Structure formats: C-alpha cells, structure tokens
Image (tube, rainbow, N blue to C red):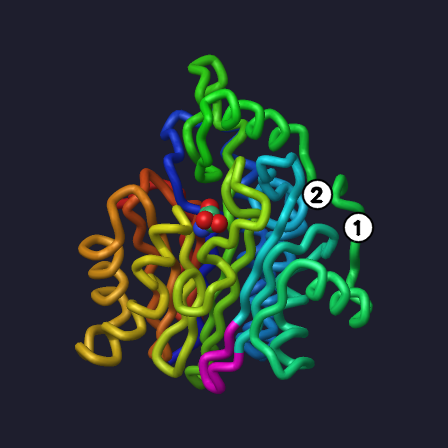
Amino acid sequence: MGWAIALHGGAGDIPVDIPAERREPREAALRRILQIGVSALNAKRSPLDVVELVVCELENCPHFNAGKGSVLTANGTVEMEACIMDGNTKKCGAVSGVTTVVNPVSLARRIMEKTPHVYLAFDGAEAFARQQGLGTMDNSHFITPENIERLKQAKEANRVQQDYSQPIKPKERDGDSKLGTVGCVAVDSLGNLAAATSTGGLVNKMAGRIGDTPLVGAGTYANKLCAISATGRGEAIIRETVARDVAAVMEYKGLGLKEAAAYIVDQVAPKGTTGLIGVSAKGEVAMPFNTTGMFRACATEDGLMEVAIWKTE
Ligand code: ASP
C-alpha cells in the first residue's frame, strides 16, 4: 500500500456555467497545492505535517474561504476556525473565533501539541497565538472586495448562506463570489492518518457562530481506520456528526471507506448540504458530495490523480 492524499476547496451550489476565468485559477490552485502535498509525502513528511502544510497553502490562497479570503460575519468581520487531528493518537486541536491569525490550522496544531486542551476560542485563542509567536495580521488583511459584495447580497436577501450559494442577482451569477472552506486528509505508506479543515464559515453568519469545521467528529475526524474532512452546511454536518459517522460505519459495519462515505453522504446527510474527502489506512480515497459540486483533488502513490468540481460519472 502507498500513500494517498485528498484536498477540498468547499462544497455547495456551484453553477456549472462558472466562466473559465473564475474556475481556472481555483483549479490551478488545487493542482499546485496538491503537488506540494505529494512532494511532502514523497519526502516522507508525516501525514500530520502534510495536512497542516496543505491547509496553510489553501488558507493563504484568497480563492478559498479560509484564512485570507474568509467570508464575512453579519458585522462585516472575519472569524476563522480550524481543526487538525492525528489518527494514531486521536490527538486533536481546534480553534474558533480568531480574527487575526494568518494560519488558523497551525494554531490548532499548537493547541493540540502545546496545551492540555483540545479547543480554544476567541480572545484566549488569540492570546495563545501571540504567545506562540504565530503570524498575525489586522482583520482587514483577510477581507476581500468579493466578500464585501457577497455579504451585501446576503443581507439584501436576509439569509445566511453557504460560501458557494448562488448569488442573488441573476446578472451576478458569474461565479465570481464562489469561494470555499478548505480541508486535507492524508495517509502514508505505513497507514498513519491525519485530517485538517479550515474555514471562514458562512456568509452573514452571526458573530460568535461556530460551524462544523472545528468540531471533532463533525467537520474533522481521524482514527486508525480513516481521516475525514467535511464541507457544506455546517449546522447539518454537526447534527449528523458526519466525519465520525463515516469512521463509525467502517468500524461497526465493516464497510470500506468508499461505501461508508457514500452511505453517510447519500443516505444520512440532508440533500444539498454535505461533501467530504476521506482516505483510509489501506490507501483508499473517497470524495462524495450531495451538493451540486465540490472543489476537490486527490493523488495516490500508485498514480491516481484527479482535480474536479462537479460529478465525474
Ligand atoms: N462547513 C462550513 C461551515 O458551515 C462552510 C463550508 O464548508 O463551506 O462553517
């Protein structure tokens, strides 16, 4: 068995007619960042290092809804959250409500490794990031003009929306405002697994809202069988404990990763709400979704490589 890696840039109602100039930079970013993960796995970096590295790259890319490029709260601010988990030890770290931390996933890892806790949020998380010397920037650094426009639209329509929701005005249905939560899962050739997810959440979310991304077992989970990162409508993913449920179905029903992930996405999670990426200790990859699309990419040591948005079969 060889290594395997998968990453996502968010699931949602992604229109199939996104103009090429909007779609291609995102596909190119997925391809470039996938390659960074592949090189790290080939260099025998641990899956935990690989998922952190890949998610940092995705956070730094303004095309996605995490780190710089995060969507805005109803107050017009950015509140980011992230989670990382190591499958062997089940050690995990999570963070919510950070407004200045450049790479929330790295803060999540520090919480996992340098505190007796799993989860820090808001002021305490900010203070810990500074104590650890992690990079910080003023909140305005994370805010893009596209996200200011998307918040305006969401407020006009009086709704809290997923990052890929169709813009409200037909003339604006050009895909420009389509961004996405990010995640990465990886397994090495010894079967060591790790998962990480990072997000700005939902457009026009209430200040203080916490989604599925940082919640262990909902948006992110890893054990000795599999590593999972979910994306979509956070409230639905939390209610169905999507990431842990995939692992539980593998564990208790003896299903393989693909069957377990398809079961949860097709039979359990409400339609139009959920996508996930997963890898198993056996090196399998699954990337199902019940939304219109999911920005995603994967590679395996034996030569599989895929970058896709909509259903491929
Ligand atoms: N799941 C994220 C949230 O609800 C959003 C997303 O995946 O796009 O915060």
> Residue 119, position in %: x, y?
58, 70
Q: Which mark is residue 137?
A: 1
Q: Which numbered disc flags the more N-terminal residue, 1 or 2?
A: 1
Give x and y (percent) for residue 88.
Answer: 46, 85
As for residue 133 lying within the magenta part, the answer is no
Q: Quadrant of residue 251?
A: bottom left
Label 2, secondary structure: give it.
helix
Which is nearer the eye, 26 or 234?
234
Q: Give me the residue at 61% from left, 32% from top.
A: 147
As drawn, the label of residue 142 is 2
The answer to whether residue 87 is magenta is: yes
Q: Quadrant of the C terminus?
A: top left
- Quarter where residue 166 is shown: top left
Label 2 within 8 A of ligand 1 by Cβ? no
> Which residue is situated farthest in the top direction here?
171
SS class, disc 1: loop
Give the class, few, some or many, for how many residues have Cα within 10 Å of label 2's Cα (few <14, many ≥20). Answer: many
Q: Is residue 97 left or right of residue 19?
A: right
Using the image, determine if residue 307 lies above or below residue 15. Answer: below
* Residues at circles 1 and 2 in contact by the CB criterion of under 8 Å: yes
Q: Is residue 217 left or right of residue 131?
A: left
Instruction: Magenta stretch: give its range.
Output: 85-91
Badge 2 amino acid: Phe
Residue 104, given in percent of the width and then of the height, sits at 65, 60
Residue type highlighted by circle 1 = Met
In-image side of 232 versus 38 (left or right): left
